[in-house]
Image (cartoon, grey):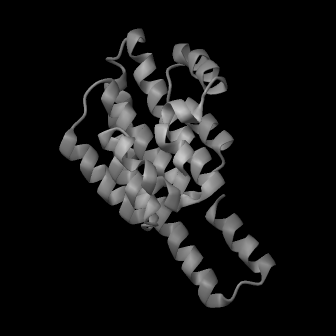
Amino acid sequence: MTLEEKVFEGLDKGWKLEYLKEKISEGITEERVRDGILNDVRQDAFKKLKSACDADASFLIDAALYILALAQTARSHGLLCLDILIEDLPEPLQIPIQMVADCYPYGEIVEIATNDYWSRDPQGIQAMVSYIYICGALYIRKGYSPDALKDALETLFPLNWRQEYRERCEKMELTKILPKYESI
């Protein structure tokens, strides 16, 4: 949803002026972050992805499936339930998901997660995996549906890997990806 759409929605709902100003400020911050440091990480990840081979597709698909499983879990049980699952997640995903579970503001999640990305300096396929983790956490924080998230993540895959991604998404089982899911 664009900033303009959010403003019109707020006006239609009769939001008070102070609340509307807050939402506008958040929207501007998110747009700046998306156009700034997050975009730099995306470009770096795409450059490094070019060195990946077809055998690396499963690493990228697994990363996306983690995010989709977390999105479904958060949608069903709330953001706080993600806290239970954190220790079983891959290390680069733990920080952004912990911040989402703790309801950090969008801008802070981006700042910390991208700092972590640059300090790790992931290479090859791991760069795009890290970018998927960051974006996925942000989408979960914003409450995107798992279906919308699945489609958004697909755009990060090379064309020749997308069919395998779609097939694995259809067969995805939450308890296999997130073993502690049943304890929620």
Identify the residue at image location x=56%, y=43%: 182
Front position in the image: 77 or 98: 77
Identify the residue at image location x=71%, y=65%: 5
**Residue 153 in the image: above or below residue 111:** above
- Percent position of residue 184, x then y: 55, 52
- Percent position of residue 139, x then y: 54, 51
**Residue 89 in the image: above or below residue 170:** below
Q: Is residue 159 left or right of residue 112?
A: right
Quadrant of the snapshot with the N terminus: bottom right
- Percent position of residue 130, x then y: 35, 38
Asked whether residue 156 appears in the rendered view, the answer is yes
* The furthest residue to the left: 119
Which quadrant of the view contains residue 24? bottom right
Identify the residue at image location x=60%, y=42%: 149
Front position in the image: 62 or 88: 88
**Residue 58 in the image: above or below residue 69:** above
Identify the residue at image location x=57%, y=30%: 154
Front position in the image: 18 or 175: 175
Q: Is residue 105 left or right of residue 182?
A: left
* The furthest residue to the front: 183
